[in-house]
Image: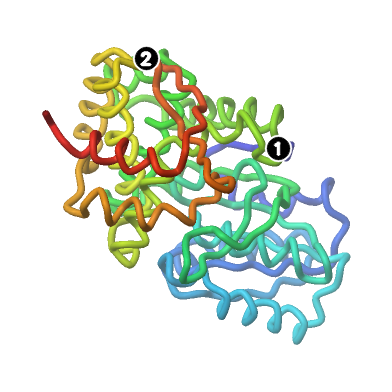
Amino acid sequence: MSEIIIKSGVLKNLGHLVEGLLKVKTFAVISDENVAPLYGKTVADSLVGAGYRVISFTIPAGEKSKCADRFFELQNWLAENHVTRSDALVALGGGVVGDLTGFVAATYLRGVAFVQVPTTLLAMVDSSVGGKTGIDIPAGKNLVGAFHQPKMVVCDPYTLKTLPAEVFSDGCAEVIKHGMIRSKGLLSTLEKSGFDGEIADIIAENIDIKRTIVQRDEFDTGERQLLNFGHTIGHAIEKLSDFEVSHGQAVAIGMCIITRAAVKKGLCPVECLEILERLVEKCGLPAKTDFSAEEIYEAALGDKKRMGDTITEIIPREVGFCELQKMPVSELLEWITSGQSNT
C-alpha cells in the first residue's frame, strides 16, 4: 500500500516529501478550476523549490470531467509536454481529479507514477486510498478504469476549511459507510461529537479501515466489495439525475434503502437503521429519493458487482458490521422496492 501522510499545512512541504520517494525530473500537476486557484501555487512552488520541473493542467470542476474526452485530452497534453516514464503526475483535488489522474497515470506510456493530494473529505477518507482509478461512460459510472496504486497520499486537513458545506457533507457519507461496515466505535463517536473533534483523527481511522480491507483484497474480488455499501443504488441515482445528485448524497440514499430492506427482512436490528438515519440527517444528507424503484433497478443493471445473472450486495447485519450477499439480479428490484417504502 501507498505511504499516507496526514498533517495540517503539509502541502507546502510536498516537494521535500517526494524527494526520497521518486527520482523524477518533471511533475505534471492536474487539478480543477475550484482547487487550482486555492492550492495550485503552493504545490507548484514546493515542487519547484525541491528542484523539479512543474507543468500544470486545470480541468472543469464536477463529475462530467471524468470522461473519455478529458482522459484523451490529458494524454495528449502529457505527450506534447514530453512527459516520460521517469516523470510523475500529481492529483490535486477531490475524487474526480483523483480518479481521472490515476487512470491517466495507469495508462499513459503503459503506466507512470502518481501522487494523490486529496483536498476534499470524500477523497481523503475514500477515493484517494486503495488504487482504484477510472472514468465514467454513458452506460454508467466508473465502468472504465484500472487498479493503479499512488506512490504516496498526502492529506492536508487545512484544505477542508475552504470546502463548501455540501461538499464536506458528501465526504461524511463515506465516513458513515466505513462505520456501518466495520466500526461500531466510529458510529458511536459520530453520534456523540460528529465532526467537531480532531478531523485528522477521523481521517486516519477511516483510512485505516479502508487500508485494512484493501490489503486483504486489492483487486476487489471479495471483501473489498464491502466498501461499496450503498453504491449500487447510489451510482444508479447519480446516473438517473445526470449527476445533479452528488456522490455522497446518492450513497447516503443507497445505504438507507438497503438498510430499510434488511430490517424488514429480519436480517439486521432496527437499531442499525435508526443510527444510520440519525447520522445521515445530522450530516445534512438525504435518506430518500423521488426516483422509482423500477428506475433505480434499470439504472443499476450495469453495476460492476454484477456477474452474469447474480449481483453482490452489501447487507448490514448488526451495528458496525455488514456482509456480502450474492443474489439473483432479479431480486434486487424487490430489495429496492422494500427499502423505498416506510411500511
* Element class at badge 2: loop
Model colouring = rainbow
Q: CA distance from mark 2 to mark 1?
A: 25 Å
From the image, which quarter does the N terminus lie in?
top right
**Which residue shows up at 29% across the image and 26% down it?**
194
Left or right position of 274 against 142: left
User: Which residue is the site of mark 1?
Assistant: 218
Q: Nearer the viewer, residue 8 or 115?
A: 115
Residue 330 location, quadrant:
top left
Q: Residues within 10 Å of mark 2 (few under 14, many from 20)?
A: many
319 versus 332 height, above or below? above
**Which residue shows up at 52% across the image and 27% down it?**
324
Q: Position of residue 264 (x, y in %)?
A: 24, 22
Tag 2: residue type? Val
Which of pointers 2 and 1 lies earlier in the amino acid sequence? 1
**Which residue shows up at 64% across the image and 37% down it?**
5
Q: Nearer the viewer, residue 34 or 235?
A: 235
Q: Position of residue 235 (x, y in %)?
A: 40, 52
Q: Position of residue 337 (x, y in %)?
A: 24, 40
**Which residue shows up at 21% across the image and 52% down it?**
292
Left or right position of 120 against 117: left
Tag 1: residue type? Glu
User: Which residue is the site of mark 2?
Assistant: 319
225 versus 73 height, above or below? above
Left or right position of 3 against 36: right
Q: Nearer the viewer, residue 303 or 187?
A: 303
Residue furthest out toward the bottom: 80
56 versus 231 height, above or below? below
* Element class at badge 1: loop
